[in-house]
Image (spheres, coloured by chain):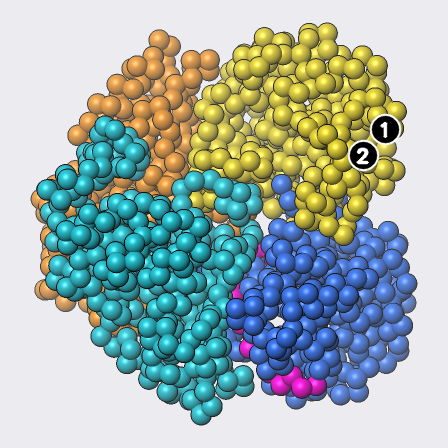
Chain colours: A orange, B blue, C cyan, D yellow
Amino acid sequence: MVLYQMLAGHPHVDGVDLYGHNLTEPVALASAVPQFVGATDVVLQPYSEQVVMAQDDVVFFATSAGVTRTAAVPYITAGFPMIDLSGDLRLKQPDLYTQWYHKPAAAKQILAQTHYGLSDLQSSAGMAAIANPGCYATATLLGLAPLVQSGLIMTDSIIVDAKSGTSGAGKHPGELTHFSQANENLQVYKVNQHQHIPEILQQLQVWDQSIAAIQFNTTLLPITRGLMSTIYARVWPDVTAAAIDEAFTSTFADVAGVRYTGDRLPNLKEVVGTDYCDVGAVFNPTTGMVMVVSVIDNLIKGAGGQAIQNMNQMFGFPEMAGEPVNVILP
Amino acid sequence: MVLYQMLAGHPHVDGVDLYGHNLTEPVALASAVPQFVGATDVVLQPYSEQVVMAQDDVVFFATSAGVTRTAAVPYITAGFPMIDLSGDLRLKQPDLYTQWYHKPAAAKQILAQTHYGLSDLQSSAGMAAIANPGCYATATLLGLAPLVQSGLIMTDSIIVDAKSGTSGAGKHPGELTHFSQANENLQVYKVNQHQHIPEILQQLQVWDQSIAAIQFNTTLLPITRGLMSTIYARVWPDVTAAAIDEAFTSTFADVAGVRYTGDRLPNLKEVVGTDYCDVGAVFNPTTGMVMVVSVIDNLIKGAGGQAIQNMNQMFGFPEMAGEPVNVILP
Amino acid sequence: MVLYQMLAGHPHVDGVDLYGHNLTEPVALASAVPQFVGATDVVLQPYSEQVVMAQDDVVFFATSAGVTRTAAVPYITAGFPMIDLSGDLRLKQPDLYTQWYHKPAAAKQILAQTHYGLSDLQSSAGMAAIANPGCYATATLLGLAPLVQSGLIMTDSIIVDAKSGTSGAGKHPGELTHFSQANENLQVYKVNQHQHIPEILQQLQVWDQSIAAIQFNTTLLPITRGLMSTIYARVWPDVTAAAIDEAFTSTFADVAGVRYTGDRLPNLKEVVGTDYCDVGAVFNPTTGMVMVVSVIDNLIKGAGGQAIQNMNQMFGFPEMAGEPVNVILP
Amino acid sequence: MVLYQMLAGHPHVDGVDLYGHNLTEPVALASAVPQFVGATDVVLQPYSEQVVMAQDDVVFFATSAGVTRTAAVPYITAGFPMIDLSGDLRLKQPDLYTQWYHKPAAAKQILAQTHYGLSDLQSSAGMAAIANPGCYATATLLGLAPLVQSGLIMTDSIIVDAKSGTSGAGKHPGELTHFSQANENLQVYKVNQHQHIPEILQQLQVWDQSIAAIQFNTTLLPITRGLMSTIYARVWPDVTAAAIDEAFTSTFADVAGVRYTGDRLPNLKEVVGTDYCDVGAVFNPTTGMVMVVSVIDNLIKGAGGQAIQNMNQMFGFPEMAGEPVNVILP
């Protein structure tokens, strides 16, 4: 829905067609989502790849794991612009996907043709098939990139304590997200099992092959929107606070969707409702460690907002076109 | 669980046996509820009324609607002390039960033998079978009693805007109580259909037969614990603020479980974690209406805490014995 | 800030100048509000009415009570478009303002020249000076309008149980809004003293002179954004559910900013992040009362969003131009 | 207040006297705290050490930093039982106190006579002067003790990502704890400056002198009660999951106030409302790191509850006597 709203308001998008995989006949969006009553008469159509290819210029998949493994193939084969928000096409090695997702993987050559669209650091310009990064992966990779790319940290020392609101868990009620359970609570989940671990590692290894593993932990916050990755790593001897600051400053100097806040660490309210990733970093000379705090709106930068950035890059639109105005703050 | 904890800590209770209707073999409480690990080695037993009657002095039912209609019968017939926390035995007329609960009702003579245990206003001393009041009914009836019993208000003018936290909805996840839906939200539910409406009305009519109906509304709050009934009614001409104050003061003068706060209106934090109902009342001379705010902890005064008050009265223990110390406030 | 963001993204607004009453020299907006770092290089200027009149086409005041009483005078005198978001210019009678705001009032002829901009029901087209309605007043008046204008309800029977999130209380910490106090709580405040009471009454009397008073209560919710007015009133004998439905349907048939949801009562999530007021109504034949639930985002429809609607009407822009896309829902 | 409530309900405590440092005449507790109306007629007395020593058997200080530095001296000198909940007497080196608290420190010999009352690991039996540990220090030290005491981890690898609810910040409103700011947010604060850092380090060094520093971070949660320390450390080569499990099991085998949950990581709801510290630990063979999750109620185990444990040990009462029954869970 957030993705639809952003596309519907995008200055370079003429129209948005909505399709439902399980629909057999059209359904008015407003009948499914009360918020849209009066605001739109858009109708969800039964999904058909023939119709999509005939009517649309790009297709977004906001489907569960296991769908685009096959559903994306015709688009990729045809070179039709495709952006997949699921995890199906992110991992280059099929067996890794099966290990972490417990499902059959897409074919290796399909994975090879898909670009990992971490849009702020590796542009999707010129690409046709995009795997849109996961929410935890986005915040964590943007927070780690300057340190890893500059070789400032010991590569076996990376620890990520990540926290997310419940909207990342989707719309279906469950035990962890039952209000009486989640409210006024903090719950660690998927210990050492989160499927974003191999995704993060794969990209870190693109930047530095010597990184063999990361310690990565996820905690469910008693909030709806927002995600924070708190990152710890040991710097090499003689690395200074100034060198760290320089690495972040230069990495994000020309990056539209990341704001480096220096040693003032950002909080969630600064980014919820926007497509920004805010990143701050503090060096602790006593311990020789650097702490990075990287925050995003998990449903915007961590999903639909970054998907739009990828589309903007594919089609040559201004990088942040159509990204939402933040009207959340009081 | 709250009931169990209070009973386990009750100074006049020697032991608590726990039974599960659906159990076929014993289960350690701590294996079901992590909070009790180390704190107790109590075991839940398969339910058997023979065992209960042989081993225990009183039985509490904390079951869903539809169970005690039959399960309570042997105890009531035998005159064995029984306190039912479900709604099955509250309404004296079987057809009313069926109309509001959409289930078969208990037999009329069983209902006739059950005392409606609104413990602060009608003692359970000398009673054997108790229907413990519903949470909304408790807060609303305690807030209305002084006005109705003193004849200060027009009997067709009662409006109750009641609000409750999600714990009243139980432990099972549902759409209304999904965190992403309930958090930062306010949801009206069961409009004019809440099963506490006939329960409240039945008791009001005990106090004043001329009351034919009440306007009663329930709203789900984005909190776990706590319930507020905001009550509006029109007073008869010439009724003064002093008369209203006098009605509340005298009604609650010797009532252990209700605290009248005068025209300072109480908030939820003042009662959550306690068995108190706090009640404040403000007369508005401009409109001729009185507003009453009545707050309780829905799981204590609105359930297990009042059940213990009823037990205390049945057995002649001090009225508030075993009621929890409030350790919730910062 | 919400107002600024909406204006900055408005399709018919070319530029936005920000002024601070207390500034003696320019300050970068981003230095005051971290969210704007990188997103804007806008600078707050020291306020000067000469500069405003020379450079701008319309002025918005988002000031505390007591400022526009004098500050708005030059604009009103000059016929320069002015929209005041404070309460200073809403009440037509100076003594009423002084009684409820405990401050000196604006001059009577200034008040007489100001239009009460309840934009969905009385257009600001052709007006120059606008008093933008209060948040509680907006939700309450939109919920009551169909009933009052159609003469369906007894005019002395109106009761409003209104609830609002903490953002309505502004940015300055206080006891009621201290997190440990407000969280998991519900607090009634300003009992029979809320300054929106005379504002609501004044407008109701425009629609029906016989309305002498309303019972109106405000409760602080443990959420940041969102406001619900739950309205109760007794209908005249023989008024049917169909007549009530017809009144709401016809009143809001051509109103851009209000969505009538019939007897499905709206919740806060449906409107937070938008400029919509959603209104539902349910007739209770047992009590002869109608219950209306009216919900808004207190910072958008209840403040800046309605101010923009007023501007749109003044300047002939499309009614909902520049109103935010709702990106809050998961 | 939580401390008072627990003492008032303690089975081995006959009476509780309350004193206020700034009082010049007695004040009824119920007049200051509405929750106590009707529940107690206790009166706060102006503080006088003569009266305390004459009337009471033990004194608790729940004062701000800077008070007990001098106020505790007469009791310590006299050997009168004293438990200080402030940070004044925790650090053995005066200059360290001054460095982290920015205040004058207590005299070195006073500090030397004070026992650091981490009650679950170093008993206060036989002690007269107790410095009750800080909330973060308690959770962190209990989580680290088995690893450090058993020598399983590399001593320069300790990283603590700690999170706490707002009640730790006290009753006075501030910017960080303003509801509109704290709600739906996550805020890192006191980066590398938290005064519990030297307190934790001092105790770790008691267990292993080679520990020179820890990386310790604090984040403010949008909840009222509860504290989680997520601890990461690198184990020595060849350390196994079984060895880690054995260390925790044996350390806490006879400890009344700590529950080891194995590799099931505890959440806040399991301990809020209790004096338990729940600790779980998971070894990650891929990274060679162990993650420990340690949770407490910051106002009970992290303050008053541990103070009572210390009193129980001093006076030979049962270890967990008077600790609250958890009635918070739904």
Q: Nearer the viewer, residue C214 or A245?
A: C214
Quick one: label 1 or label 2, which is nearer the N terminus? 2
Residue C257 is situated, as x and y percent measured from the top left of the image, at 26, 66
Q: Quadrant of the N terminus of chain A?
A: bottom left
Q: Is residue A292 left or right of residue D21?
A: left
Q: Nearer the viewer, residue D166 or C304?
A: C304
Q: Is residue B211 magenta?
A: yes
Residue on which disc 1 sits? D56
Q: Residue furthest bottom?
A: C238
Q: Which residue is drawn at the image coordinates 49% and 35% (left, top)?
A: D174
Q: Are marks 1 and 2 in contact (CB under 8 Å)?
A: yes
Amino acid type at image mark 1? Asp
Residue B313 is situated, as x and y percent measured from the top left of the image, at 85, 65
Prevailing SS of the magenta stretch: loop
Q: What's the chain of the residue with tag 1?
A: D
Residue D241 is situated, as x and y percent measured from the top left of the image, at 58, 31
Residue B21, above or below B96: above
Q: Nearer the viewer, residue B238 or C166?
A: B238
Question: What range is drawn magenta here?
Answer: B209-226
Q: Is residue A59 left or right of residue B168?
A: left
Q: Which residue is drawn at the image coordinates 34% and 15% (left, top)?
A: A241
Q: Which residue is drawn at the image coordinates 40% and 42% (left, top)?
A: C171
Residue A72, above or below D122: below
Q: Is residue C239 magenta?
A: no
Q: Quadrant of residue B248?
A: bottom right
Residue B174, above or below D235: below
Q: Residues within 10 Å of mark 1 (few under 14, many from 20)?
A: few
Amino acid type at image mark 2? Asp
Is residue C324 among what the camera can see?
no
Element carrying mark 2: loop
Question: Rounded to the nearest whole Å, what is the CA distance between mark 1 and mark 2?
Answer: 8 Å
